[in-house]
Amino acid sequence: MDKQTKTKIKNLVLALRDDLEKEMENRLDNIGIYLEKEWKDGRSLTHLSKDELENRKRVAAFIKREEKIGLDQRKATSEFIKEASYTWINRLLGLKCMECRGLIDEVITTRPEYGGRSKRHRDFRDKNPDKAAQPDDALIACLFSAFEEVTEEIKVLFDPKNEYSLVIPRYPTLKKAIEKINTELDYNTFRGDEFLGWVYQYFNSREKDRVFEEVRTKKKKISGSDIINVTQLYTEKYMVRFLVENSLGAMWMEMYPDSQLCNKWEYFVKDPNNSRREPKPVKEITFLDPAGGSGHFQLYAFDLFYDMYLEEGIIPKDQIPEFILRYNLHGIDIDLRAIQLSALGLYMKAKSKNPDMKVQHMNLVSADAIMLDSDILEEFLQEFKEDQTAQELIKVIWQGLENVRELGSLLKVEEQIDDVIKRQKDKRLDFFGEGTGKGWEQWKRDLLAALKRYYEKAAQTFDINKQMFASEACKGVQLLDLLEQRYDVVATNPPYMGRPNMGDDIKETLSTLYPKSNIDLYLVFIERCINFAEEKGYISMITQQSFMFLTLFRFTRFKILNETFIRTMAHLGPHAFEDISGEKVNTTMFSLRKEKISNISVFLRLIYENDKSRILKAVSTGQCENIVFKINPQNFEIINETPFTYWINKKMIDIFSNFSYIDNYAFIKTGMRIGDNEKYLRQLWEIDKQKIGLNWFPYAKGGGYNKYYLLPDLVIDWREEANNYYSENGSHRNPDFYFKEGLTFSSISSTGFSVRYLPKGCLFDSKGSCIFNKNVDIFYLLGYLNSKFIDYALSFLCSTADFSIGGLKKIPYKSPLSETEKNVAKLAINCMNLKKELLQYVINDSGFKQTAIQWGYNVLKEKGGGV
């Protein structure tokens, strides 16, 4: 999709949102529910009818539900306004998409020949003259009739009885929204599979900007609904195709190597190992996206499954769409709006293959249940008063789903349930087994039936809280149904969020469930996706590249290498996402097979390529071999902590195998972390020279690319009050190395690695970490570390712009011959002295003597020349 079209979609979505949110707030005001002030008592709203009062009661209870998870009334009301607005946007755009595909009569598209109405609106008025006489011209009734027509098949979006349907925009707002939809975008835009994904991306764009700004300026921790706002990132079309083709497609080709389907796949990478596996019916191949978003992976997987069914030739063609939705595709997301769009997209995809089919089932679950109301839970447990095990299982489910709205598919409720079942099996051989014991599947059906009975009973007594309890519980059980299964293919673009930005509840839960990978959400998802996959199943993901190299993320590398085989990895680097500029997000795509084997993996190096989609297509046809690396991942183990240095050549492999690490010959130490630089650091020229070396000292804090020599231009306060602060604030790091002679370097540099001499009497920062002599000449180290060989070695050890201590410690090192050591040290000293000579002409350097112009003037004057 071109940039101009995406801009139009964004403008349309945000305009619709502004109009509908304002309207929703007005409609709530009318029923005494306010955003900024205390709500009215329902009994005082004499202008409302009995039905309107009942609806108001349901809406109020629904908003109060949000308060039970920690939101104040204003925030809970604001969330309802936003969600209701988005549901209406999804409905209106959904109807437009369906009519553009010829799946329903025109509901949104207006035409002059119908009096400026849609065909369905015109026909509805003719059949219902009493409604046509209403002030809204029967538009609202017409829309609800359309909702009811499709709600049986796609209830999650169009259900006219859910709480968001109880607050209805007025005629002028709906008329204006329909007019914008019909005029802002062209017909073909609504037909594209990508359209709904961009709607989802842009609806939250303002919240995303707001939260990131609060994280940056206020150090805000991310939790609750903000997780949705900041972690959604539209997955580009080429990424989805690459990942699905090299997982689901790869599995098919392993089962049927003579299949011609791969000729249709533009991003399929052939397996150099010609791997094989036992065939299985297409109906039994399961696919999960555990962070589904608006369903891009499932939509493309649908296409592959459809062709696979056709090639298999067992299921009648007209039944294939229903089989795909019922048996093959599964999706989970913490955002109901995403599930709405996923369901709509799959509905339209299925209907495009067979317009006459009835969609009866989709395996899509919104992980947004609120499992509270302990008093009601205790009452509900009486439904199972004769079965103590059932009561224990229900309590485990409730407790296990406590943080479901924030963590969704990351929760491991199924493991807690397995523990209960195992304990009971040890006591009773017939429990969930053969004989008289009740099977787990039957038990779940009984639980859902009991919840439905409880809901119906509550409805008869008009107990809204109990109805909501049962409804939320059903969602929890449906989620559990997907969590306990294992899948042939797990494919996703997981959310990215570092631990420092996580809210406390998320941190605590992830620390318990994922003690080694909770550094970032995407690492947790890698571990969870491996867990979700069947043995020999595929895990296909796009994530940040940091896990490939950083010491802190080594557990993820170990897990991948010890539990899976890397079939294909496309190292994209920066600029992979069209909507993200600069170097902010460096990414990689990979397809893993869940089995430990020694084989050849295919790595694609696209970090310097701009048109990544085109290059990946070329690779699929045997071109661009210069970016293709075929390597056994066991080679990664040659380098300590196994960074994924797939582009390493044989000579470097030998060097890393036979050399020692520099850590055995030098100390590499991080420096201070002050915490209040503005108070305790000064530029060198700001402090009286007489004080430097007494209570102010030169302070190395990184800086730009500079080799061999550059004295620090900062000084640090070393008076008593400052030292007290450093001690109390935990600022000190490696104090035994303060004031010693050494080498310093910038920990972050996009230009390259550069080391410079640091004389005695200096201190150093974490951004200007230092290297100290252990048993080798410091000036030899200065020359060695500034060599081209080290630049090349660091391309494997520190493949990002961050030169970490862990990476530097693994620099290969071999003790030099005595003469070599002396010669290199001498050359390094010469380079250092030359740099000193140059710096005496730099006006802001501490060694400044005169400008280059002054020097030239003096030289000419000494020679008696003209000036």
Image (spheres, rainbow, N blue to C red):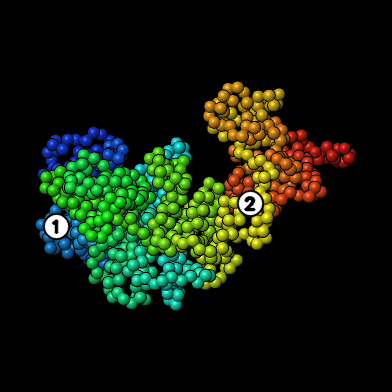
Q: For this view, does 676 lie left or right of residue 366?
A: right
The C terminus - image quarter? top right
Q: In the depicted view, which residue is nearer to us: 503 or 312?
A: 312
Residue annotated with mark 1: 132
Q: Residue 359: x and y, percent?
A: 25, 65
Q: What is the three-letter code of the residue carrying label 2?
A: Leu
Q: Residue 81: x and y, percent?
A: 28, 45
Residue appearing at x 27%, y 48% in the figure: 393
Q: Quadrant of residue 711?
A: top right
Residue appearing at x 30%, y 51% in the figure: 426
- Contact, CB < 8 Å: mark 1 with mark 2? no
Residue appearing at x 16%, y 51% in the figure: 453
- Say few, some or many: other residues with alpha carbon within 10 Å of mark 1 (under 14 / 14 to 19 / 20 or more): some
Q: Residue 206: x and y, percent?
A: 39, 46
Is residue 715 at all visible to an observer of this figure?
A: yes
Is residue 846 at all visible to an observer of this figure?
A: no
Q: In the depicted view, which residue is nearer to us: 643 or 296?
A: 643
Determine the secondary structure under disc 2: helix
Determine the secondary structure under disc 1: helix
Residue appearing at x 29%, y 53% in the figure: 425
Outermost right residue? 864
- Say few, some or many: other residues with alpha carbon within 10 Å of mark 2 (under 14 / 14 to 19 / 20 or more): many
Q: In the depicted view, which residue is nearer to us: 393 or 259?
A: 393
From the viewer's perspective, is the residue at label 1 or at label 2 nearer? 2
Query: Compared with residue 177, is residue 849 higher up or lower down, i.e. above or below?
Result: above
Q: Residue 491: x and y, percent?
A: 41, 59
Q: What is the three-letter code of the residue carrying label 1?
A: Ala
Dot 1 or dot 2: first in sequence order is: 1
The N terminus - image quarter? bottom left
Q: How many marks?
A: 2
Residue 777: mark in rendering? none
Residue annotated with mark 2: 794
